[in-house]
Amino acid sequence: DGGITQSPKYLFRKEGQNVTLSCEQNLNHDAMYWYRQDPGQGLRLIYYSQIVNDFQKGDIAEGYSVSREKKESFPLTVTSAQKNPTAFYLCATTPLTGPGDYGYTFGSGTRLTVV
Amino acid sequence: AQSVAQPEDQVNVAEGNPLTVKCTYSVSGNPYLFWYVQYPNRGLQFLLKYITGDNLVKGSYGFEAEFNKSQTSFHLKKPSALVSDSALYFCAVRALNSGNTPLVFGKGTRLSVIA
């Protein structure tokens, strides 16, 4: 959606396995975000990054890790420490400079299922 | 702390009737408010936003929202609902001068428009 590519669309994880979700953007946006969506719980923030090589924990960071080595990419690793990882994961971006405030642009999501 | 409440998990409306999806918020200072829509297995799409100015904001697909500061509300409205409006709707907020802190999302309201 709108210059953000999330892959894969569907991902299956075995117990005790780490998996990495990809988020790539060509919008030249500064900030990138990872949200987790569960039915009836809305969107909960996992991690976000406003600049390369820097990121902050969100509300539910435990069991997840991220990196921001380049502006275009913000991969999310779901580690074996995350006990209930089955969810829909959404990546979002926004510019932090320029006129106005454009809100977020979202990717199309990755559905992760533990098998 | 910022928060958003969407008091209705589900809203049902007949096609052609007006619809309202409710949102109330809590922030320190002036709010920056958004509505997004999500179709099944997709990312969120921007509908409209309020920063300052007119309390009635017009957005995509014929939707509008009314900002009411005294009631801390930002209800989404449409004069005549379409079956294709059936989707999950999210309200989001952050404080206007909060230094680019992430948006906080409500839990979502599922709108069902019945033909």
Image (tube, rainbow, N blue to C red):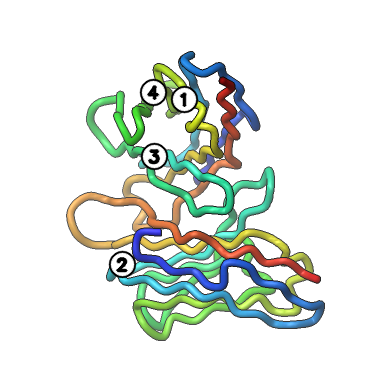
Q: Position of residue A46 (x, y in %)?
A: 57, 64
Residue B68 is marked as 4
What's the residue at 77%, 65% (across, down)?
Answer: A84
Label disc, if present, on residue B33 of the rendered structure? 3
User: How far is mark 3 from mark 4, CA to CA?
Assistant: 11 Å
Q: Residue furthest top?
A: B17
Please, what secondary structure does the residue beneath circle 2 have?
loop
How far is mark 1 from mark 4, CA to CA?
A: 26 Å
Which chain contains the residue that carries disc 4? B
Residue B100's x, y, as percent? 36, 58
- Have a look at marks 4 and 2 and say if they share a chain: no
Q: Nearer the viewer, residue B62 or A89?
A: B62
The image shows residue A37, relative to residue B90, as above or below, that is below
Q: Which mark is residue B82?
A: 1
Disc 3 crowd rating (10 Å Cα; few below 14, some 14-19, many 20+) is many
What chain does badge 2 belong to? A
Report, in whole angstroms, how far the alpha carbon at label 3 lies from the one at label 1. Answer: 24 Å
Query: Badge 4: few (under 14), some or many (20 or more) residues near its Cα, within 10 Å?
Result: few
Instruction: Give the residue type at disc 2.
Output: His
Residue B78 position within the rendered picture, expressed as x and y whole percent measured from the top left = 41, 22
Label 2 close to label 3 by CB (< 8 Å): no
- Name which of mark 1 and mark 4 comes first in the sequence: 4
Which element carries disc 1, helix, strand or loop? loop
